[in-house]
Image (tube, rainbow, N blue to C red):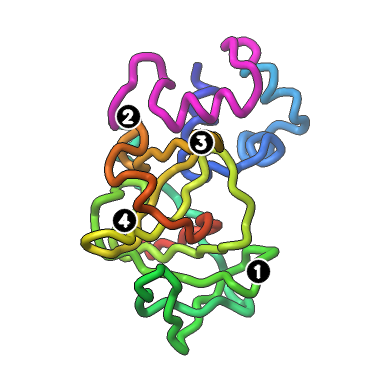
Amino acid sequence: MENLEKMAELIRQNPSITVKGLAQKLGYSEERSIYYWLEKAHFKGIKAFKHAVLTGSFPPGQRKLGADLDRVREPEVAPAPSPGVYLARSFKSDGTPVLSTEKIAVNVTPLSPRAFAVVIDEAEYSPVVLPGDVLIIDPQAPLEDGRLTAFWLSQNHQRLVLRRIYGKKPLLLIHPAQWGHAPGSSPPAAELTLIGPVVCLIRSL
Protein backbone atom coordinates (compact mmCIF):
# COMPACT_ATOMS: atom_id res chain seq x y z
CA MET A 1 0.00 0.00 0.00
CA GLU A 2 2.88 2.37 0.75
CA ASN A 3 4.12 2.19 -2.85
CA LEU A 4 0.63 2.88 -4.19
CA GLU A 5 0.24 5.86 -1.88
CA LYS A 6 3.52 7.30 -3.17
CA MET A 7 2.29 6.78 -6.72
CA ALA A 8 -1.02 8.42 -5.85
CA GLU A 9 0.71 11.47 -4.41
CA LEU A 10 2.81 11.85 -7.57
CA ILE A 11 -0.34 11.64 -9.69
CA ARG A 12 -2.07 14.31 -7.59
CA GLN A 13 0.93 16.57 -8.13
CA ASN A 14 1.05 15.86 -11.87
CA PRO A 15 -2.02 14.07 -13.31
CA SER A 16 -0.34 13.68 -16.71
CA ILE A 17 2.67 11.80 -15.32
CA THR A 18 3.52 8.64 -17.29
CA VAL A 19 4.36 5.15 -16.07
CA LYS A 20 7.96 5.87 -16.99
CA GLY A 21 7.84 9.05 -14.94
CA LEU A 22 6.43 7.20 -11.93
CA ALA A 23 9.16 4.57 -12.19
CA GLN A 24 11.86 7.24 -12.28
CA LYS A 25 10.40 9.15 -9.33
CA LEU A 26 10.18 5.97 -7.24
CA GLY A 27 13.65 4.78 -8.17
CA TYR A 28 12.62 1.78 -10.28
CA SER A 29 14.79 0.86 -13.24
CA GLU A 30 11.89 -0.70 -15.17
CA GLU A 31 8.28 0.34 -15.78
CA ARG A 32 7.03 -3.16 -15.07
CA SER A 33 7.59 -2.52 -11.37
CA ILE A 34 4.76 0.03 -11.52
CA TYR A 35 2.49 -2.43 -13.30
CA TYR A 36 3.34 -5.06 -10.67
CA TRP A 37 1.98 -2.87 -7.86
CA LEU A 38 -1.08 -1.92 -9.89
CA GLU A 39 -1.88 -5.55 -10.67
CA LYS A 40 -1.33 -6.54 -7.05
CA ALA A 41 -3.93 -3.95 -6.02
CA HIS A 42 -6.32 -5.17 -8.75
CA PHE A 43 -6.10 -2.08 -10.95
CA LYS A 44 -6.47 -2.67 -14.68
CA GLY A 45 -3.68 -0.38 -15.75
CA ILE A 46 -2.50 3.15 -15.04
CA LYS A 47 -5.66 4.88 -16.37
CA ALA A 48 -7.85 3.03 -13.89
CA PHE A 49 -5.50 3.91 -11.03
CA LYS A 50 -5.34 7.59 -12.03
CA HIS A 51 -9.13 7.72 -12.19
CA ALA A 52 -9.38 6.24 -8.69
CA VAL A 53 -6.84 8.70 -7.30
CA LEU A 54 -8.26 11.82 -8.93
CA THR A 55 -11.89 11.06 -8.10
CA GLY A 56 -11.10 10.31 -4.46
CA SER A 57 -11.84 6.57 -4.44
CA PHE A 58 -8.21 5.78 -3.63
CA PRO A 59 -7.25 5.24 -0.87
CA PRO A 60 -10.38 3.13 -0.24
CA GLY A 61 -13.05 5.10 1.57
CA GLN A 62 -11.49 8.50 0.88
CA ARG A 63 -14.31 10.65 -0.45
CA LYS A 64 -13.01 14.05 0.60
CA LEU A 65 -9.73 15.85 1.09
CA GLY A 66 -7.60 14.00 3.58
CA ALA A 67 -4.55 14.94 5.59
CA ASP A 68 -2.23 13.75 2.85
CA LEU A 69 -3.75 16.28 0.44
CA ASP A 70 -3.20 19.12 2.87
CA ARG A 71 0.56 18.80 2.72
CA VAL A 72 2.47 21.35 0.67
CA ARG A 73 3.11 19.70 -2.66
CA GLU A 74 6.30 20.20 -4.62
CA PRO A 75 5.14 21.66 -7.93
CA GLU A 76 6.88 21.18 -11.23
CA VAL A 77 8.90 24.36 -11.05
CA ALA A 78 10.07 25.35 -14.50
CA PRO A 79 13.66 26.63 -14.36
CA ALA A 80 15.08 29.43 -16.51
CA PRO A 81 16.45 30.06 -19.02
CA SER A 82 13.81 29.39 -21.67
CA PRO A 83 11.93 31.37 -24.31
CA GLY A 84 8.97 31.71 -21.95
CA VAL A 85 5.31 32.52 -22.57
CA TYR A 86 3.39 35.77 -22.23
CA LEU A 87 1.32 36.44 -19.12
CA ALA A 88 -2.39 37.03 -19.64
CA ARG A 89 -3.47 40.26 -17.93
CA SER A 90 -7.18 39.75 -18.69
CA PHE A 91 -9.60 37.83 -20.90
CA LYS A 92 -12.06 38.91 -23.59
CA SER A 93 -15.73 38.04 -23.26
CA ASP A 94 -15.21 34.87 -25.33
CA GLY A 95 -12.32 33.67 -23.15
CA THR A 96 -9.51 34.79 -25.46
CA PRO A 97 -6.52 35.87 -23.34
CA VAL A 98 -5.32 39.46 -23.57
CA LEU A 99 -1.56 39.13 -23.23
CA SER A 100 0.80 41.53 -21.54
CA THR A 101 4.39 42.19 -22.52
CA GLU A 102 5.63 40.25 -19.46
CA LYS A 103 7.05 36.80 -20.09
CA ILE A 104 7.16 33.84 -17.73
CA ALA A 105 10.20 31.57 -18.14
CA VAL A 106 9.31 27.90 -18.40
CA ASN A 107 11.13 24.76 -19.43
CA VAL A 108 8.20 22.72 -20.73
CA THR A 109 8.48 21.39 -24.25
CA PRO A 110 6.94 21.33 -26.68
CA LEU A 111 4.69 24.38 -26.25
CA SER A 112 2.54 25.73 -29.04
CA PRO A 113 2.68 29.42 -30.05
CA ARG A 114 -0.73 29.83 -28.37
CA ALA A 115 0.52 28.87 -24.89
CA PHE A 116 0.24 31.55 -22.22
CA ALA A 117 0.54 32.04 -18.47
CA VAL A 118 -2.07 33.11 -15.93
CA VAL A 119 -1.80 33.92 -12.22
CA ILE A 120 -4.44 32.38 -9.94
CA ASP A 121 -5.75 34.82 -7.34
CA GLU A 122 -8.50 32.86 -5.59
CA ALA A 123 -8.25 30.07 -3.01
CA GLU A 124 -11.10 28.05 -4.55
CA TYR A 125 -8.77 25.34 -5.83
CA SER A 126 -6.58 24.93 -2.72
CA PRO A 127 -4.57 22.85 -1.98
CA VAL A 128 -4.19 21.72 -5.60
CA VAL A 129 -3.74 25.25 -6.93
CA LEU A 130 -2.91 28.02 -4.46
CA PRO A 131 -3.33 31.79 -4.72
CA GLY A 132 -0.27 33.19 -6.47
CA ASP A 133 0.39 30.02 -8.48
CA VAL A 134 1.22 30.58 -12.14
CA LEU A 135 -0.40 28.16 -14.59
CA ILE A 136 0.93 27.56 -18.09
CA ILE A 137 -2.02 26.83 -20.37
CA ASP A 138 -1.58 25.48 -23.88
CA PRO A 139 -4.78 25.46 -25.99
CA GLN A 140 -3.17 23.03 -28.43
CA ALA A 141 -1.99 20.48 -25.84
CA PRO A 142 -3.83 17.11 -25.92
CA LEU A 143 -6.83 16.57 -23.68
CA GLU A 144 -6.24 13.62 -21.34
CA ASP A 145 -8.30 11.97 -18.62
CA GLY A 146 -7.59 13.52 -15.23
CA ARG A 147 -5.71 16.48 -16.65
CA LEU A 148 -6.28 19.88 -15.09
CA THR A 149 -7.92 21.99 -17.78
CA ALA A 150 -8.93 25.65 -18.04
CA PHE A 151 -12.39 26.72 -19.17
CA TRP A 152 -14.07 30.09 -19.60
CA LEU A 153 -17.38 30.64 -17.83
CA SER A 154 -19.40 32.64 -20.34
CA GLN A 155 -22.50 33.30 -18.24
CA ASN A 156 -23.11 35.74 -15.38
CA HIS A 157 -19.73 36.42 -13.72
CA GLN A 158 -17.34 35.71 -16.56
CA ARG A 159 -14.15 34.12 -15.27
CA LEU A 160 -11.58 31.37 -15.73
CA VAL A 161 -12.48 28.06 -14.08
CA LEU A 162 -10.41 24.91 -13.60
CA ARG A 163 -11.69 21.36 -13.88
CA ARG A 164 -10.30 17.86 -14.30
CA ILE A 165 -11.73 16.21 -17.38
CA TYR A 166 -12.79 12.61 -17.97
CA GLY A 167 -14.27 10.94 -21.03
CA LYS A 168 -15.70 12.56 -24.15
CA LYS A 169 -19.39 11.77 -24.55
CA PRO A 170 -20.45 12.73 -22.01
CA LEU A 171 -17.56 14.92 -20.89
CA LEU A 172 -17.21 14.74 -17.10
CA LEU A 173 -15.86 17.79 -15.30
CA ILE A 174 -14.58 17.48 -11.73
CA HIS A 175 -13.60 20.35 -9.46
CA PRO A 176 -9.88 19.78 -8.72
CA ALA A 177 -10.23 20.40 -4.98
CA GLN A 178 -13.38 18.29 -4.52
CA TRP A 179 -12.12 14.76 -5.07
CA GLY A 180 -15.21 12.88 -3.98
CA HIS A 181 -17.94 15.15 -5.32
CA ALA A 182 -20.25 14.57 -8.26
CA PRO A 183 -18.68 15.89 -11.48
CA GLY A 184 -19.55 18.94 -13.44
CA SER A 185 -22.80 20.07 -11.81
CA SER A 186 -21.82 23.71 -11.17
CA PRO A 187 -21.42 25.55 -13.39
CA PRO A 188 -23.13 23.52 -16.15
CA ALA A 189 -20.77 22.24 -18.83
CA ALA A 190 -22.89 24.04 -21.44
CA GLU A 191 -21.82 27.38 -19.96
CA LEU A 192 -18.11 26.54 -20.21
CA THR A 193 -15.85 27.17 -23.19
CA LEU A 194 -12.67 25.13 -23.44
CA ILE A 195 -9.49 27.18 -23.24
CA GLY A 196 -6.87 24.44 -22.90
CA PRO A 197 -5.01 22.01 -20.62
CA VAL A 198 -2.71 23.17 -17.85
CA VAL A 199 0.74 21.90 -18.80
CA CYS A 200 2.74 23.33 -15.90
CA LEU A 201 2.25 24.87 -12.46
CA ILE A 202 4.82 27.28 -11.07
CA ARG A 203 4.80 27.96 -7.34
CA SER A 204 7.03 30.29 -5.35
CA LEU A 205 7.91 28.48 -2.13
Image position, residue 135 (x, y; %): 45, 63
Q: Which is more foreground, mark 2 or mark 1?
A: 2
Q: Which is more foreground, mark 3 or mark 1?
A: 3
Which part of the image, by quadrant, shows the C terminus? bottom left
Q: Which residue corresponds to mark 2?
A: 182
Q: Earlier in the sequence, mark 2 or mark 1?
A: 1
**Amino acid type at image mark 2:** Ala
Mark 4 surroundings within 10 Å by alpha-carbon count, few (fewer than 14), some (14 through 19), many (20 or more): some
Height in image: 123 above or below 50? below
Q: Which residue corresponds to mark 4?
A: 130
Q: Which residue corresponds to mark 1?
A: 112
Q: Is residue 55 located in the magenta-colored stretch of the structure?
A: yes
Is the C-beta separation of discs 3 and 2 under 8 Å? no
Q: Earlier in the sequence, mark 1 or mark 4?
A: 1
Q: Which residue corresponds to mark 3?
A: 166
**Amino acid type at image mark 3:** Tyr
Tell me where residue 56 sits by quadrant: top left
Q: Earlier in the sequence, mark 2 or mark 4?
A: 4
Tally of numbered discs: 4
Question: In the image, 141: left or right of 191?
Answer: right
